[in-house]
Image (cartoon, helix red, strand yellow):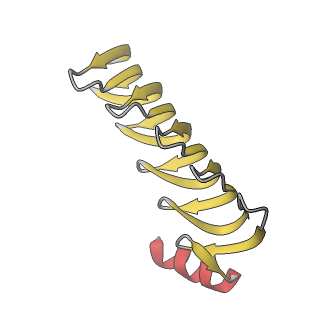
Amino acid sequence: NHGMGKVSYPDGYQYVGEWRDGLQHGGGITTFPDGAIYEGEFVEGLREGGGAIRMTDGFEYDGGWFDGEIHGAGNAKYANGDVYQGNFLKGQRHGEGRMEYASGAVYDGYWVNGRRGTKQEAEAAAAQAN
């Protein structure tokens, strides 16, 4: 399979977009069986580059992806109303970022594996991840 195409399965999974060597590659839209929708870039079958996902539980993300995971700069809106703008590493808030909590509280600083941290902790954890 090469070029534009569509695949659908009985469980509701559907992909419409670009293919290369039988894999999702380039721009496309995936609808998952639970109703979640991803629209963005793929590399050799994995979400990679820029893309947005909207989950049925209210989670939304728009930004970078790498190796199928949220990675790099992006914006996330959580089901509870919290909004995060910043960096991610392997699906977790990591590095510089700003969280605006639904309560009105704001944290503007560094994150390490999804938790508040220091710049030094973030840099050390990122170095270990690579």
Residue 1 seen in this snapshot: no
Q: Is residue 33 above or below residue 89?
A: above
Residue 30 image offset from top left, x and y in percent: 41, 28
Q: Is residue 32 visible?
A: yes
Q: Is residue 126 above or below residue 44?
A: below
Q: Give coordinates of residue 129: x percent, y percent.
A: 46, 72
Residue most toward the front? 103
Q: In the displayed structure, does residue 6 sit left or right of residue 55?
A: left
Q: Residue 21 appears in which quarter of the rendering?
A: top left
Residue 90 locus on image (x, y percent): 47, 61
Quarter occupied by residue 9: top left
Q: Residue at x 59, y 51 (%)?
A: 78
Task: Please tell me how many numbered marks the rendered image carries.
Answer: 0
Above or below residue 128? Residue 13 is above
| Picture residue at 68% right of the left edge, 83% below the top | 118
Q: Is residue 80 left or right of residue 1?
A: right
Res. 88 image quadrant: bottom right
Question: Residue 112: x and y, percent?
Answer: 58, 76
Q: Nearer the viewer, residue 66 or 57?
A: 57
Depth check, front residue: 68 or 81: 81
Of 37 and 102, nearer the camera is 102
Q: Quadrant of the N terminus?
A: top left
Query: In the image, what residue occupies the spot 40% across and 27% down?
Result: 31
Above or below for 16 versus 23:
above
